[in-house]
Image (cartoon, rainbow, N blue to C red):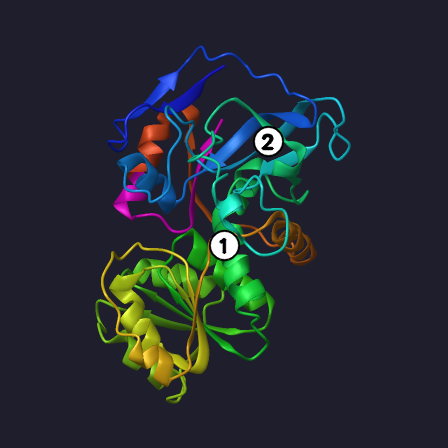
Amino acid sequence: MKTYELKELKGVDGIVLNPGRPTPTPAPGEVLIKVRATSLNYRDLVVASGHYPSSIKPAVIPLSDGAGEVAAAGAGVSEFKVGDRVAGTFFQGWLSGAICAETTGQALGGAVDGMLAEYVVLPQNGAIGVPSHLSFEEAATLPCAGLTAWNAVVETGRVKAGETVLLLGTGGVSLFALQFAKMHGARTILTSSNNEKIARAKALGAEMLINYREKPDWDQEVLRLTSGRGADLVVEVGGAGTLERSIRSVRVGGTIALVGLVAGLGQIDPLPIIGRAIRLQGIYVGSREMFAAMNRAITQAQLRPVVDRVFDFDAAKSAYAYLASGAHFGKIVIRV
């Protein structure tokens, strides 16, 4: 089978196509998945560059996110049958309950082989059925970006109708968070530096939009739009580069779901967090149980993920380059 392998941690150039890797055979309790589509996350750029904080398996198959169909099942598999449409779960061992050190050591495309291959083998608990109305390309966007946004907005943020959610940018997590916030009746404020992307976000239902290049003090604009109160929830994808403004944008007693580090690292003064009783919660994707809850909600709402562009398998490196460019709106997918 064809598969990509991360031979060296030096960026996209370290990703090598292996055209002759043996197709794996499922052991008892495992399923063989014929991968139909995979999707990229910012994490994949960090892993390839060698800057990911956790250990990376040598010559790892990259990408945590993918969807396909069960091609074979090992002895004792009861949840799936051949032909079932499934996705892999980001954390292979986090089934339910609180996250712990043992579960974070089993992330696809990092500590263990990922989904950028024609076939993968996963434990049956490391796969999950996907909503029937979604294409494989759409379903492939769910395991990391979709579930991270669900965890931030629903599981952690517990957003209610009428509350205000602040979203930064128009990447996959932010647009999923926009869709989930709207699903729960919340108002949304979204920031971007691109007016074309702002117009597209408005078409998706974002009520209030801020171009942060035109209004660099965007935290003050958030306060103006909320009559000085601030947002109930901020889905913070920038990291330390934007966190100070997010702290000033959230209401007293509000929540900041810290998801990513796209805007870089830095130091943060903890006094405003304490003095305004802000809840600052790190979000590291989610459990299989959360994934199942998200799938039920997606099915009920007939929600469709925002896919920006689909690349062919042989153009996987071009997909990485497109992600690095920041030109995308929503998710980037590779069709296998």
**Amino acid beneath label 2:** Gly
| Residue in the picture at 35% in, 85% down | 275
From the viewer's side, name the closer residue of 272 and 235. Answer: 272
Q: Position of residue 29 (x, y in %)?
A: 69, 28
Q: Give the quarter of the image for residue 334.
A: top left
**Amino acid beneath label 1:** Thr
Asked if residue 225 is positioned above or below residue 306 in the image, the reply reads below
Q: Residues within 10 Å of mark 1 (few under 14, many from 20)?
A: many
Q: Where is residue 324 in the image (x, y as percent from the top left)?
A: 28, 43
Mark 1 element type:
helix
Q: Where is residue 167 in the image (x, y as percent from the top left)?
A: 40, 66
The circle drawn on residue 68 is 2
Asked if residue 205 is positioned above or below residue 88 in the image, the reply reads below
| Residue in the picture at 55% in, 29% down | 36
Which residue range is magenta in the image? 322-336
Name the residue that disc number 1 marks. 148
Residue 245, visible in the rendered structure: yes
